[in-house]
Image (cartoon, rainbow, N blue to C red):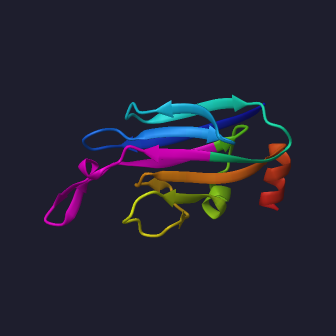
């Protein structure tokens, strides 16, 4: 079993965003409570490559408050820590994870080195099982 843990801060205006966690397109959890969360799940995965996908949905123009052209309130997910088998993989993800916004006004079609997810979209990263081998490969 592979343990996945994602700790995030949920900031919202007007209504909360929906956060859905998948591994290899298998939904592990869905959260629309609008509170900070630590999502933990254990998944039985075969040896080889797998993909984690964190989907952010539900953001619309009512989630952003602007005054005189300046954003004063916004809605976003701030990733604090992501762990595989109790090991924080934040440094690896800073180099390898990507966020694919689903928004016509996004800064770029793919965002890298982000921890603040402020658009509808998908945050994705790949890893391999056994995780300890993957971690050694990435760190050395």
In-front residue for pair 135/106? 106
Question: At x 41% / y 65%, what residue is drawn?
Answer: 106
How many dots with numbers? Answer: 0
Image height of 121 relative to 19, above or below: below
Q: Residue at x 35, y 48 (%)?
A: 59
Horizontal side of 10 relative to 5 (left or right) equals left
Q: Quadrant of residue 87?
A: top right
Residue 49 vs 33, above or below: the answer is below
Q: Is residue 104 left or right of residue 139?
A: left
Residue 66 lies in what quarter of the image? bottom left
Whole-percent x, y for residue 129 in the image: 82, 44
Q: Which sits in the foreground, 10 or 18?
A: 18
Decide whether residue 128 is among the magenta residues: no
Relative placement, left or right, of 102 versus 13 is: right
Who is closer to the viewer here, 79 or 98?
Answer: 98
In the rendered image, residue 22, in percent from the top left (x then y), is placed at 61, 39
Q: Residue furthest left?
A: 68
Magenta segment boundaries in residue numbering: 53-82
Say which residue appears at 45% left-offset and 57% top-offset: 102
Q: Residue furthest bottom?
A: 108
- Residue at 53% x, 34% y is 38
Q: Quadrant of the C terminus?
A: bottom right
Please identify the quadrant where the N terminus is shown. top right
**In the image, residue 73 lies in the stretch drawn in magenta:** yes
Report the magenta stretch's main SS: strand
Residue 117, how many percent across, how many down?
A: 45, 53
């Amino acid at each position: 079993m592979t343990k996945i843990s994602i700790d995030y801060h949920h900031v919202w205006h007007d209504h909360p965003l929906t956060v859905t966690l998948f591994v290899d397109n298998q939904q592990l959890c869905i959260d629309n409570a609008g509170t900070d969360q630590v999502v933990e799940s254990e998944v039985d995965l075969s040896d080889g490559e797998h993909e984690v996908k964190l989907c952010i949905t539900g953001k619309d123009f009512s989630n952003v408050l602007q005054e005189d052209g300046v954003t004063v309130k916004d809605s976003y997910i701030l990733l604090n820590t992501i762990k595989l088998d109790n090991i924080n993989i934040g440094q690896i993800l800073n180099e390898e994870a990507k966020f694919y916004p689903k928004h016509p006004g996004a800064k770029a079609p793919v965002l890298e080195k982000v921890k603040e997810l402020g658009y509808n979209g998908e945050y994705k990263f790949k890893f391999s099982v056994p995780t300890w081998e993957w971690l050694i490969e990435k760190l050395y």
